[in-house]
Image (cartoon, rainbow, N blue to C red):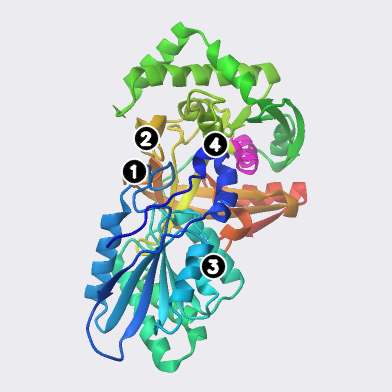
């Protein structure tokens, strides 16, 4: 199939990744309507479905999930072939769309074409295509290309659930049979003529294919927590440095924790001034202790060590215990010259907080519950849900390898490039499994703490998307786990240990409330 290869980059234009997540989809432009036709069978009476792949380009020219240079062509061909094979009696027409304009063009061209419904595959995260397609009123099946489109998929699917969009069903599974089962729901809707039945039919198919809960008994964990009052006291005595602009100075508070803005230039100067002998010593230690160093040059290790030492110097200057940085915006904008990933890894191992993407909500969550657990590190992630495994997978390129705190046992870790752009140095932490974890996020305006528990069950080595991927089985209703992403955003923060009761205690003394996500 021949498809256009127009691309307007967003990640590389100096935006923070957080800004990109909320704004990039709206800036998509240019039509990529390609068109191959796959016929499962000839003749009349077939269920005719248009498959719309929502993505930047057939071969990814910029940093984003899954990664720069990723070739979607073979993936789309495999999906097309698997649909034709698995759905006898269906006719599939395949197209690509980059944003709302492309989607409108497709809908306009489909008038009178006898299309019975749409399968929209979210291949990249933030391309807004499904919203326009769903507005057609026809039944729409929304599918996640996992480790590619998962962020947008979760946020957009939650919005559809909140709006009670009865013509849209969704599937989030690494097992293609689950997609086929959902596609077959189009047949029943064609017979009845009631598109409003579609969401319910797909939900029934999804639920029927989701495994029953497994053994949620966990290994013993000697978790010790502070009282809510002492935890709040330590939060107020903490300080977060937010690195992401040109000005330095006080910036209010987040969850009762003081925040100070720090200019990129200040961190970059500290990076330049880091003692080179110390940088070599830190790089030596990383090389010695990592289970593997792959694709990362020695020079990159030393510049990463300089960033770590520079950040420690800035933390000391401000009397702070947490730092969060607009890392991608700073790196691509030329404001900083080394990724902070390894530095964040090191800070989190020491009981301090190094947090990605200048995400203040997640940073405050790390500070609050790090204080409560007496130094256990929080792990910011971009989660993915896979119903075929009954799992939520927490994925990111920064992770501690001391999940039980600075004095706890270490676990193996690898040093690899940052996944999205294959540059710099980041961490894959091979975390211990069999333990209960608690995942949280805050919503300060509403004074809410979001929470779910999950048992860590595996480390996924998939090369797509972020390096560390912790597969966990949620405690509770996995269907409910789809509902809050439009309100809280994609990031979550995971701690080892069962923090449900302490979270309720902290919320009570702060006058906040707890929202259980699963």
Report the mark closest to the observer, 4 or 1: 1
Q: Residues within 10 Å of mark 3 (few under 14, many from 20)?
A: some
Q: What residue does disc 4 label?
A: 356
Between residue 400 and residue 143, name the one nearer to us: 143
At 35% across and 61% down in the image, what residue appears? 389
Report the mark closest to the observer, 4 or 2: 2
Tell me the distance, in whole angstroms, between the alpha carbons under discs 4 and 1. Answer: 23 Å
Tell me the distance, in whole angstroms, between the alpha carbons under discs 1 and 2. Answer: 10 Å
Of the image marks 4 and 1, the number of the one nearer the N terminus: 1
Tell me the distance, in whole angstroms, between the alpha carbons under discs 3 and 4. Answer: 29 Å
> Where is residue 214 shown, x and y percent of the image?
37, 62
Q: What residue does disc 3 label?
A: 131
Quarter assignment of residue 271: top right
- Local SS, label 2: loop
Q: Residues within 10 Å of mark 2 (few under 14, many from 20)?
A: some
> Where is residue 65 shown, x and y percent of the image?
42, 47
- Local SS, label 1: loop
Q: Which residues are magenta?
A: 358-373
Tag of residue 444: none
């Amino acid at each position: 199939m021949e498809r256009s290869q127009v691309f307007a980059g967003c990640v590389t234009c100096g935006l923070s990744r957080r800004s990109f997540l909320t704004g990039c989809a709206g800036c998509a432009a240019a039509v990529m309507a390609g068109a191959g036709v796959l016929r499962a069978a000839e003749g009349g009476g077939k269920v005719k479905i248009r498959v719309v792949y929502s993505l930047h380009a057939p071969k990814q020219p910029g940093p984003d999930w899954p990664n720069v240079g990723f070739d979607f062509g073979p993936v789309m061909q495999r999906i097309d072939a698997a649909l034709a094979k698995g759905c006898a009696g269906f006719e599939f027409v395949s197209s690509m769309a980059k944003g709302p304009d492309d989607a409108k063009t497709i809908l306009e061209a489909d008038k009178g074409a006898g299309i019975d419904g749409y399968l929209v595959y979210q291949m990249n995260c933030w391309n807004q295509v499904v919203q326009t397609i769903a507005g057609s009123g026809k039944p729409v099946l929304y599918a996640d290309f996992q480790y590619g489109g998962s962020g947008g998929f979760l946020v957009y699917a939650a919005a559809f659930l909140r709006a009670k969009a009865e013509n849209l069903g969704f599937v989030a599974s690494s097992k293609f049979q689950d997609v086929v089962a959902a596609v077959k729901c189009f047949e029943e809707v064609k017979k009845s003529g009631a598109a409003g039945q579609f969401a319910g039919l797909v939900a029934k198919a999804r639920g029927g294919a989701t495994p029953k809960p497994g053994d949620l008994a966990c290994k013993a964990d000697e978790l010790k927590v502070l009282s809510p009052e002492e935890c709040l006291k330590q939060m107020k005595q903490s300080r977060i440095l937010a690195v992401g602009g040109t000005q330095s100075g006080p910036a209010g508070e987040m969850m009762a924790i003081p925040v100070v803005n720090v200019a990129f230039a200040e961190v970059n100067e500290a990076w330049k001034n880091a003692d080179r002998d110390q940088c070599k010593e830190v790089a030596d230690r990383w090389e010695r202790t990592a289970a593997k160093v792959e694709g990362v040059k020695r020079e990159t290790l030393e510049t990463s060590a300089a960033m770590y030492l520079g950040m420690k110097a800035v933390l000391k200057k401000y009397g702070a215990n947490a730092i969060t940085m607009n890392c991608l915006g700073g790196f691509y904008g030329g404001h900083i010259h080394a990724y902070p990933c390894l530095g964040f890894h090191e800070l989190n191992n020491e009981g301090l907080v190094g947090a990605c993407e200048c995400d203040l909500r997640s940073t405050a969550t790390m500070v609050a519950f790090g204080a409560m657990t007496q130094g256990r590190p929080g792990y910011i992630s971009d989660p993915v849900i896979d119903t075929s495994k009954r799992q939520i997978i927490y994925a990111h390129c920064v992770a501690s390898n001391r999940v039980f705190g600075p004095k706890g046992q270490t676990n193996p870790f690898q040093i690899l490039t940052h996944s999205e752009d294959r540059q710099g140095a980041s961490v894959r932490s091979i975390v211990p499994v069999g333990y209960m974890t608690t995942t949280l996020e805050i919503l300060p305006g509403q004074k809410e703490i979001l929470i779910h528990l999950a048992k860590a069950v595996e480390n996924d080595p998939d090369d797509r998307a972020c390096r560390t991927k912790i597969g966990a089985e949620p405690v509770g209703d996995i269907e409910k786990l789809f509902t809050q992403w439009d309100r809280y955003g994609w990031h979550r923060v995971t701690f080892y240990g069962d923090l449900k009761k302490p979270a309720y205690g902290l919320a009570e003394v702060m006058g906040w409330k707890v929202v259980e996500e699963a």
